[in-house]
Image (tube, grey):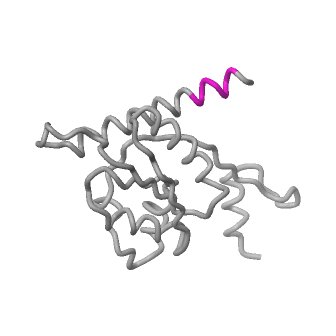
């Protein structure tokens, strides 16, 4: 199990380095004389402390060591499903110094359920790296007479 965790940590670190290199090339653009990063980077987590920010802080620590600049993790909870933090990043200068560390929610679910997000989930962000993946489960109380999604749907639409 320990080997698996170390392997996963290595993959996360590799993804973080890839993210940093992609951001560097995007931030420098046509001005090749600049070096990225030349100042601290802000990583916004649109959720309260104690959840997603734990991984963000681990990634930030490794990226900071690799890039030679501090990476400050800032929690920006509030709004529906992370929209406050996403809006802050969308409104920031597009210079690679403000990153959004998030689950897909503020970019997918929020766009589907809120009419006015104050940002465009497609145009306001550029995906850089997948840092982690986690499975989702659909579970039911044992008394529900369904053993598959199809049976659950049939049960849900059945009119008694």
State the residue at coordinates (54%, 73%): 78
Q: Quadrant of the C terminus?
A: bottom right
Q: Please report the residue visible at 65 percent of the width from the left and 55 percent of the height from the top.
A: 51
Of 83 and 115, the residue lying toward us: 83
- Residue 45, image x, y percentages: 51, 58
Question: Is residue 5 left or right of 88 when viewed as pictured?
Answer: right
Q: Position of residue 60 (x, y in %)?
A: 50, 43
8 falls in the magenta region: yes
> Farthest left residue?
30
- Of residue 49 and residue 84, the one placed in the foreground of this image is 49
Above-or-below relation of 111 to 17: below
- Quarter placement of the N terminus: top right
Residue farthest right in this picture: 143
Drawn side of residue 84 relative to residue 132, left or right: left
142 is higher (above) or lower (below) than 88: above
Dominant SS of magenta comes to helix
Stretch in magenta: 3-9
Question: Which quadrant would residue 38 be assigned to in this image?
Answer: top left
> Going 34% across and 64% down the picture, which residue do you hit?
90
Return the x and y of residue 32 as percentages of the image width and height: 14, 37
Left or right for 66, reference 29: right
Q: 82 left or right of 147?
A: left
Whole-percent x, y for residue 127 in the image: 36, 47
Residue 121 higher or lower than 79, as above or below: above
Q: Nearer the viewer, residue 116 or 51?
A: 51
In the image, residue 133 lies in the stretch drawn in magenta: no
What residue is at 60 percent from the left and 53 percent from the top?
52
In this view, the residue in front, 148 or 37, is 37
* Quarter residue 5 falls in: top right
């Amino acid at each position: 199990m320990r080997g698996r965790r170390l392997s996963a940590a290595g993959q996360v670190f590799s993804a973080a380095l890839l993210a940093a290199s992609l951001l560097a090339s995007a931030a420098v653009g046509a001005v090749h004389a600049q070096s990225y990063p030349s100042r601290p980077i802000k990583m916004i987590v649109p959720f309260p402390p104690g959840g997603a920010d734990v991984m963000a802080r681990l990634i930030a620590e490794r990226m900071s060591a690799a890039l030679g600049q501090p990476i400050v993790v800032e929690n920006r909870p509030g709004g529906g499903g992370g929209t406050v933090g996403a809006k802050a990043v969308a409104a920031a200068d597009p210079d690679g110094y403000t990153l959004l560390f998030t689950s897909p929610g503020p970019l997918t679910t929020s766009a589907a359920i809120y009419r006015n997000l104050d940002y465009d989930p497609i145009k306001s962000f550029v995906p850089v790296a997948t840092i982690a993946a986690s499975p989702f489960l659909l579970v039911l109380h044992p008394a529900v007479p369904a053993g598959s999604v199809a049976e659950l749907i049939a049960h849900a639409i059945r009119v008694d």
